[in-house]
Amino acid sequence: MENLKNHSLIKRINRSKILNTIRQNPLVARSQIAGKTELDKKSITNFVTELLADGLVEEAGRREGSSGRPFTMLRFCEQYVVGIYIGPYFTRGVLLDLYGTIVSSYEEEYPMLPSRETILKTLENVYLRLTFGNNAIYGVGICLPGIIDLDGEIVIESVNLPSLNGMNFRKAFAGAIRHPFFVEEESAAIALGEKWFGVGRHYDDFICVELSGGIGSGIIYQRRLFKGAGKYAGELGHVVVHPDGKQCRCGNHGCLEAYASETAILPEFNKFLKKPLNRLAYYEPGTLPEAEFNRIRDHLAEEVGRGLAAVVNILCPRVIILTGTITDIFGESLIGPLKKNVEQSCLQGCFENTNIYISKLELLDALGAATLPLADIFEVPDYYYV
Ligand SMILES: [Zn+2]
């Protein structure tokens, strides 16, 4: 029995090796796959026959090899995955091919604190718009902010989308989505997006921190999501940076989120703007006096630096990747002050190997959601180095 189990695991790993080789080398011959995977030619022929029958891979003409013998080239069939992010202000999605290229994207806005009905209707609209007339959808990934019980399939609490609290997402989303779908919490999905498409491609371990309406993080450890015993690891926004400080929306006092989230710093912007903003995303660069802009940024770096120092002391991450609306506004100029503050608050030995980057990926939340169906094709759970 054990042997049989191992056999099927090895088979899955080898199949995954072949699929990943095709993903990284569009148009590749069977013999080239052999060179890149060290699998024997017979196994490759068998696996490729299976992938052709499954409709994942197709033959794409012949090409002359160096020996003069023609090779049949392989590529993915026209198959797609969808990633959808349900956010506080909008729901947006992307359609990707199996190489991970964005084919199209679509977004629909709604007022803050949307009803459950509005959210589900918008989800359906975005999904239909992206998949219209397309018969080759492998699967759909969906991510949303909040405490999500993935095993119990319940949204326990979403501060930004409270109408979803207590909702069984499997049942609710099934009303809108007609393909197999996968669900993940937003910060975790964002970290997966970086792992597949961003700076995270080059690292086994890293932390992706989102500075937006809320503050959260996704931890990638040895190429997989680290979730912890309660499965909600990464709640950086609720690390206390000021004991007995401001009340946080979680009920506790002095959390980082109460000092460095969009809600916390928007009033600082509005003090100096002729027309107050209700979302930081509407900020037009240059409309704030430079000195004030820099002051807000440096203060933010102090607060976030305290929170990150705790993370660095505990995990010594190789890389911290920042993303979110706040990061978009301050950009690279945030890195210097942030590094200075992290360094001041943590052990030198812990920080000297840590680098901080700003994510360069657009639509990262939706991209992250799209990695869920991609993982179902290309990854073998617990074996992330294929
Ligand atoms: Zn809190």
Image (tube, rainbow, N blue to C red):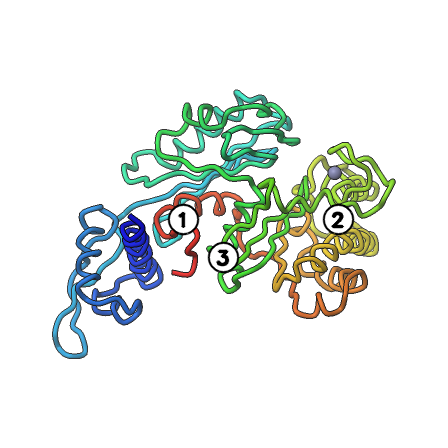
Percent x, y of residue 94: 44, 43
Instruction: State the separation of the CA atoms marked 3 and 2.
Output: 41 Å
Element marked by disc 1: helix
Q: What residue is disc 3 on?
A: 223
Q: Residue at x 40, y 38 (%)?
A: 140
The extreme left residue here reads 69
Q: Which residue is drawn at 59% across and 46% down?
A: 228
The quarter of the picture showing ligand 1: top right
Task: Give residue 81's quadrant in the image.
Answer: top left
Percent x, y of residue 280: 69, 42
**What is the three-letter code of the residue carrying label 2?**
Thr
Percent x, y of residue 234: 63, 47
Element marked by disc 3: loop
Percent x, y of residue 215: 68, 44
Q: What residue is disc 1 on?
A: 375
**What is the three-letter code of the residue carrying label 3?**
Arg
